[in-house]
Image (cartoon, coloured by chain):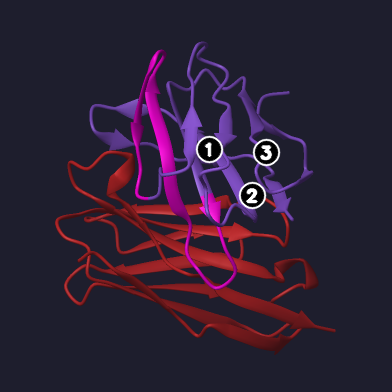
Chain colours: A purple, B red
Amino acid sequence: DGGITQSPKYLFRKEGQNVTLSCEQNLNHDAMYWYRQDPGQGLRLIYYSQIVNDFQKGDIAEGYSVSREKKESFPLTVTSAQKNPTAFYLCASSIVGGSRIGEQYFGPGTRLTVT
Amino acid sequence: KNQVEQSPQSLIILEGKNCTLQCNYTVSPFSNLRWYKQDTGRGPVSLTIMTFSENTKSNGRYTATLDADTKQSSLHITASQLSDSASYICVVSVSGGGADGLTFGKGTHLIIQP
């Protein structure tokens, strides 16, 4: 059963703690992405990776970090430096043909609440 | 600045009725336009992708149109069902752009009432 999974679905943390969100895909896609979704706003790109061991910052990378040690996995760490971490986080993957981004497949999302 | 504007922000219609959602963009140079459906608390699911040369594409009861000259797209839903209740997101891709070349609209929240 191919797809992209995120865990956990809900995550609660205290302010000042780092937290890592998991994203795994078995679609054999080279590219993976992390987005943040806030009420009333469009999705905003945090980080993306087009190949193992390489990743680029998106529009709102400050306070976040990622790693891409395996093709299937692209975990996102929300650090204590992120001023407003409470949000819905979406992971996606796609094929990449040159610079052309193929259809993106999204995971089910993780809702992070920091108090 | 590349922008994608969607209207209306929210819409309520009765089950069985048709509706049309709008997407206007200022993205340039244009590569493709995508429509996604996002159920509450879930990830978006792709409905259609259209390139510059395509002016209509269907996916079941969903039909997307694209006018690249006026930089407008619409998503028409025929014979709506309760399961169509969701947010519909328009995404425009810049030609030659990578992941940071995608511009997302804020979405239209559609509610289908029985």
Residue B7 spot, x, y in % from top left: 46, 82
Q: Amino acid at mark 3?
A: Gln
> Circle 2: is it few (<14), some (14-19), or many (20+) Cα within 10 Å?
many
Instruction: Specify whether residue B78 is in view.
Output: no
Q: Position of residue B53 (x, y in %)?
A: 22, 55
Q: Residue at x 59, y 59 (%)?
A: B37
Asked whether A54 or B88 is in front, the reply is A54
Mark 3–mark 2 CB contact (< 8 Å): no
Side of B15 where A42 appears, left or right:
left
Q: Is residue B96 above or below residue B42?
A: above
Q: Secondary structure at mark 3?
A: loop
Q: Residue A1 location, x and y as percent?
A: 73, 23
Which portion, as a residue range, is magenta?
A: A36-59
User: What is the x, y in percent for residue A109?
Assistant: 67, 45
Q: Chain of mark 2?
A: B
Residue B47 sits above or below residue B10 on the image = above
Tag 1 near tag 2, CB within 8 Å:
yes
The residue at the point 68 percent across, 85 percent down is: B17
Query: In the image, is residue B54 above or below residue B14?
Result: above
Residue B43 image label: 2
Give the residue number, with chain letter if any, for mark 3: A17
- Mark-to-mark CA distance, 3 and 2: 26 Å
Is residue A41 part of the magenta span, yes or no?
Answer: yes
Determine which of the numbered discs, if any, sits on residue A84 in the image. none
Inspect the image, locate mark 2, and give the three-letter code of the amino acid beneath it: Gly
Q: Are tags 1 and 2 found on a single chain? A: no
Image quadrant holding the C terminus of chain A, namely: bottom right
What residue occupies the far right of the structure in this picture?
B114
